[in-house]
Image (cartoon, helix red, strand yellow):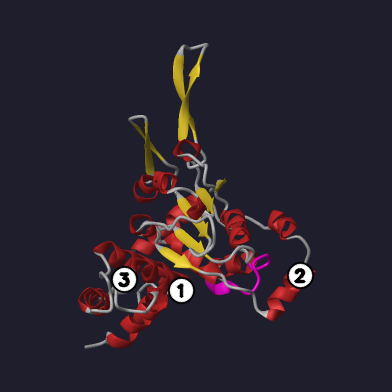
Amino acid sequence: MDIFAQITQEISRVVLGKDLQVRQALCCLLARGHLLIEDVPGVGKTTLSQAFAKVTGLEYQRIQFTSDLLPSDILGVSVFDRNSSAFHFHPGPVFTQFLLVDEINRASPKTQSALLEAMAEKQVTVEGATRALPNPFFVMATQNPWFQSGTFPLPESQLDRFLMRISLGYPDEKSERRLLAGGDPRTIIGELSAMLSAEKIIGLQSMVDKVELRDSVLSYVQRLIAFSRQDSHYAFGLSTRAALALIQAAKAWAMLAGRDYVLPDDIQILLEPVAAHRLKPAADSQEDGPDLIKRLLSQVPVVV
């Protein structure tokens, strides 16, 4: 059994019946991206993040987003020290390797924007000074559905910082029965073994960069991007950054499958988690993100 299967198996001790989502999260980490999990409360979003942090062996911090949270609560603040008669910066929880942002859309847009620089450039600027974040730096955020009370929709610029968006959904009957009979998941999380480390993850991320992207697959990606920009069903097309995200995620997915080259199947499997949150329907269209992805897959040929 390879290391990736072992990691999936270990996390599945506490997150039952969600092997696909566990592998998607691992793919996102190896691709140097950030992950957004959107679902109703109580289906295991936070449990997945805690188990994932434990198994990857990364330094972990959690921020519970609320409507009164301030940017300084995330980034940190300078505090006056009477002994030295000087201000000293006290770093916030963003200075960690694995950051869980719980219910990100319950905070105001001003607070949400505090993460933009951190997620895009792996650094933060506070009071005129720029400070680097640890390496690796991985954000796993959860959000409630937009129709629930007390939420602020994430703007497109914030959504674009997430390499992938996934949903856990309700467990199947068999898995839910095991969950109900298995006791407190927090106890099981404490028993999980760390199977990676920051150094190993950095090495795996470098290996992802070496996965081969053949010209035929690159052409397929370009056709997908071009169709989203030209078809009238889309309010706007996928950006170049979205194309780069899709390629990097596909390389990581190929490595998880034990290959050193990308297949069109990798692109198709990852198109929805990578691109659906970046697409909006045209004003006169009733389609949503998954429908727009299905349209892309059905209308754009793999080979021309």
Mark 3 burial class by Cα count in 10 Å: few <14, some 14-19, many 20+: some
Q: How far separated are the C-alphas under marks 1 and 3?
A: 13 Å
The magenta stretch spans residue 16: yes
The magenta region covers: 12-20
| Relative side of 40 to 243, left or right | right
The magenta stretch spans residue 22: no
What secondary structure is found at the residue carrying circle 2? Answer: helix
Q: Can residue 208 be seen in this view?
A: yes
What secondary structure is found at the residue carrying circle 1? Answer: loop
Residue identifier under label 3: 212
Residue identifier under label 2: 180
Residue identifier under label 1: 258
Task: Name the residue rendered at 39%, 50% in the picture.
Answer: 119
Q: Is residue 200 visible?
A: no
Disc 2 + disc 3, Cβ < 8 Å: no
What secondary structure is found at the residue carrying circle 3? Answer: loop
Tell us which disc is closer to us: 2 or 1: 2
The image quadrant of residue 183 is bottom right
Q: How far separated are the C-alphas under marks 2 and 1?
A: 35 Å
Task: Name the residue rendered at 51%, 12% in the picture.
Answer: 82
Locate the C terminus by quadrant: bottom left
Q: Which mark is residue 123?
A: none
| 100 versus 31 height, above or below | above
